[in-house]
């Protein structure tokens, strides 16, 4: 990703579904105005889902997801269909591409049921309008709209017809909260100072700040506030040199204890990880998850889940530090299992607790689906930052900017 690009996690995720040969790849080319997908007359050219980040006028930064045909055949075909359906968890807007001449099939109806179960906004795109010149397509659009109770747009990807209408339809169904969940924009006012504490140790990437730090600075600037970035060893001096009290001190979780000690009690303090737990997931659920540590028993299984595979350091937080902190806190014989990627393991209910990473590479929809899956199976879930703050006894202070979550921590919910 170049530093000029919006990270994938904050982009609207548009996924295209449909039977083979309905022209999904041509629709992508038509709405993006580029040859981004492979267009072929041979059925089933797209196999695994393909993710492509782009700026789409007038929609803005988005990720287009091209999926395999929902009518794929054979054992391998079924695997591809399963992968296609997994994409739904990350989708903000689903486009179901249908050949207008062939009409809606049972496969289309099946996938629409899945969209509706997941409460995803859907647009049915009737493609290949150019092959249907002599028919009254508007009548078909209206009657399908009534029958399916969803938006229907007729287009010709090949001739570029109906593409503006399709983009307008996409904009009209983009979930409102796509913009609403700021990182900290709702906690600060124009003119406020925010101090960001970012350790530059051997774990920090060379020559740049990590994504959550970059995104937080951007959010501060968008709020017309000021960001002061410092390392943990300079925090005391930074604070004493400020003529005005900062509205908030935000720290990397790894130096929480030092930052808490060096930040006067009358200044609000939290961590990047807690800000992202709120923006990406469900802060209240994560707080309940942190409290669930106290109920762990000998032999319980804990899943450490990460949103992507990444290079592990020798004292890696997920595979080394978190298991150590949980064992120390509980004094129990806990069994740890690990997963990485956009979905959990198939058997969520065997775990007594799930501890998830900060999810910086995931979008809110993807993370909320993981939280939902854990909740459905009554498995508590917490993220790294909240767990670290909890085991270090700093969670009450780190939740002060978020009164509801703090109340959850203080309530005897378990
Ligand atoms: S926080 Fe999670 S999603 Fe982000 S880089 Fe680490 S493992 Fe990947």
Image: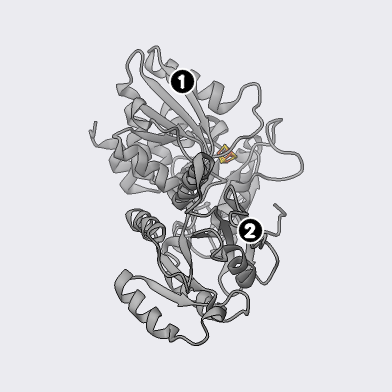
Q: Residues within 10 Å of mark 2 (few under 14, many from 20)?
A: few
Q: Residues within 10 Å of mark 1 (few under 14, many from 20)?
A: some
Q: In the rendered image, is residue 279 in sight?
A: no
Number of marks: 2
Q: Position of residue 334 (x, y in %)?
A: 41, 16
Residue 306 or residue 50, whichever sits in front: 50
Q: Is residue 123 above or below residue 308?
A: below
> What residue is shown at x 57% (from left), y 32% (from top)?
255
Cα gap from disc 1 to disc 2, whole angstroms: 46 Å
Rendered image: mark on residue 42: 2
Would residue 115 appear left or right of 223 to someone viewing this image? left
Label 1, secondary structure: give it: strand
> What residue is shown at x 38% (from left), y 44% (from top)?
283
Residue 347 or residue 221, whichever sits in front: 347
Name the residue carrying label 1.
336
Q: Is residue 90 above or below residue 348?
A: below
Rendered image: mark on residue 114: none
Of labels 1 and 2, earlier in sequence is 2
Point out the quarter of the image occupied by ligand 1.
Answer: top right
Q: Position of residue 358 (x, y in %)?
A: 51, 40
Q: In the picture, which quadrant includes the C terminus?
A: top left
């Amino acid at each position: 990703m170049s530093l000029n690009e919006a990270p994938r996690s904050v982009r609207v995720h548009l996924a295209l579904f449909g039977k083979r040969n309905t022209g999904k790849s041509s629709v992508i080319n038509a709405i993006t105005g580029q040859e981004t997908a492979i267009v072929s007359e041979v059925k089933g050219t797209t196999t695994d889902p393909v993710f492509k980040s782009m700026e789409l006028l007038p929609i803005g930064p988005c990720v287009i997801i091209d999926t395999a045909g929902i009518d794929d055949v054979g054992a391998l075909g079924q695997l591809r269909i399963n992968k296609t359906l997994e994409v739904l968890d990350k989708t903000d807007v689903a486009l179901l591409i249908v050949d207008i001449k062939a009409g809606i099939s049972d496969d289309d109806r099946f996938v629409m049921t899945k969209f509706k179960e997941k409460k995803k906004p859907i647009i049915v795109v009737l493609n290949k309008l150019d092959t249907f010149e002599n028919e009254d397509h508007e009548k078909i659009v209206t009657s399908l709209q009534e029958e399916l109770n969803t938006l229907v747009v007729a287009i010709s990807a090949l001739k570029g017809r109906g593409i503006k209408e399709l983009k307008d339809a996409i904009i009209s169904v983009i979930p409102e909260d796509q913009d609403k969940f700021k990182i900290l924009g709702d906690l600060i006012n124009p003119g406020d100072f925010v101090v960001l504490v970012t350790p530059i140790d051997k774990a920090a990437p060379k020559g740049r700040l990590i994504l959550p730090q970059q995104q937080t600075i951007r959010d501060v600037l968008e709020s017309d506030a000021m960001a002061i970035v410092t390392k943990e060893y300079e925090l005391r001096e930074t604070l004493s040199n400020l003529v005005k009290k900062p509205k908030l001190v935000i720290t990397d979780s790894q130096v929480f204890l030092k930052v808490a000690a060096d930040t006067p009690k009358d200044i609000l303090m939290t961590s990047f990880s807690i800000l992202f737990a709120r923006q990406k997931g469900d802060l209240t659920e994560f707080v309940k998850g942190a409290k669930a540590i106290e109920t762990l028993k000998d032999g319980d299984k804990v899943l450490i889940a990460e949103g992507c595979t990444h290079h592990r350091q020798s004292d890696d937080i997920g595979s080394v530090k978190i298991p150590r902190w949980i064992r120390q806190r509980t004094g129990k014989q806990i069994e740890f299992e690990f997963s990485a990627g956009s979905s959990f393991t198939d058997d969520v209910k065997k775990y007594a607790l799930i501890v998830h990473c900060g999810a910086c590479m995931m979008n809110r929809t993807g993370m909320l689906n993981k939280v939902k899956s854990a909740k459905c199976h009554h498995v508590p879930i917490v993220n790294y930052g909240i767990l670290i703050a909890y085991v270090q006894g700093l969670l009450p202070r780190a939740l002060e900017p978020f009164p509801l979550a703090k109340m959850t921590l203080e309530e005897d919910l378990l």
